[in-house]
Image (cartoon, rainbow, N blue to C red):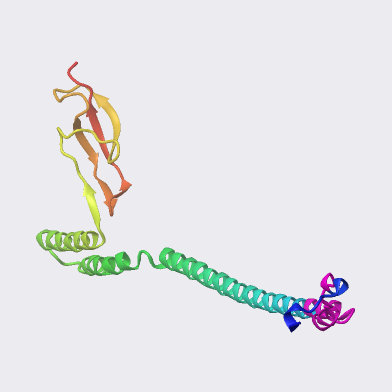
Amino acid sequence: MSASQEPVDPKQENQKPDTSEQLEVNEAPAGQAGVSDEKAADLSGAAEEGNLDAMLLAAQQEIARYHEELLRARAEVENVRRRAQEDVAKARKFGTESFAESLIPVRDSMEAALALTDQSAEAWKEGVEATLRQLNGAFERNQMREVAPVPGDKFDPHYHQAISSVPSDQPAGAIVQVLQKGYTLADRVLRPALVMVSAGQA
């Protein structure tokens, strides 16, 4: 009988292969898996703690930088406020400096005219006219202008002050007579012109 035709033991035919050695090789020793997990958790926790420390340090540095910038900004605002107050004080104190300088020659001319005692009326008049020209020049250089309406001009409450209203041939609301000229400084009214206004025909 050949080897392929040898009788097979029924017990061996139903017997399963022994894999215990394979399981022993593949399975880790008892408790080893738990130790690895704990180490991994410790490492992860340490890394997370280190990351939080780094984030905290960065946040503290950022706060310190913002605080320094805030202090600088406050100091700059305080300097600007102080300089503005000084400029306002100087403007109040020396705002009329240019106008005062323009008036000095006018005073000199008036004093010189009064010092001459033996001048004629014509010479006196010429001196007064020259002094008036100096004064007009000082007014123009400092943007000071006359408000001098003429009869027939329309009454303007921004530049004129009506003393009375009288019957007139002029239309109602028109200026009849100028009693005193007014003056403006850079379009700001220093003194309104005093006028009489027409009430219309009686």
Q: Is residue 162 above or below residue 63?
A: above
Spot the residue most to the right. Answer: 30
User: In the shown orientation, is residue 44 left or right of residue 107?
Assistant: right
Q: Residue at x 18, y 31 (%)?
A: 176
Residue 147 image-quadrant placement: top left
Q: Is residue 149 above or below residue 18?
A: above
Spot the residue most to the left. Answer: 122
Q: Which residue is drawn at 90% across and 79% down?
A: 30
Asked if residue 92 lies in the magenta stretch, the reply is: no
Q: Where is residue 20 in the image (x, y as percent from the top left)?
A: 86, 79
How many tags in the picture? 0
Front-most of residues 100 and 91: 91
Front-most of residues 34 and 1: 1
Q: Where is residue 55 in the image (x, y as percent from the top left)?
A: 67, 75
User: In the shown orientation, is residue 152 left or right of residue 66?
Assistant: left
Q: Magenta region: which residues?
A: 13-41
Asked if residue 19 lies in the magenta stretch, the reply is: yes
* Dominant SS type (magenta): helix
Spot the residue most to the top. Answer: 202
Q: Quadrant of the C terminus?
A: top left
Q: Where is residue 194 in the image (x, y as percent from the top left)?
A: 27, 38
User: In the shown orientation, is residue 34 left or right of residue 168?
Assistant: right
Front-most of residues 73 and 116: 73
Residue 1 image-quadrant placement: bottom right
Residue 100 image-quadrant placement: bottom left
Q: In this view, does 188 lie above or below 163?
A: below
Q: Residue at x 28, y 65 (%)?
A: 103
Q: Position of residue 109 (x, y in %)?
A: 22, 68
Spot the residue most to the front. Answer: 1
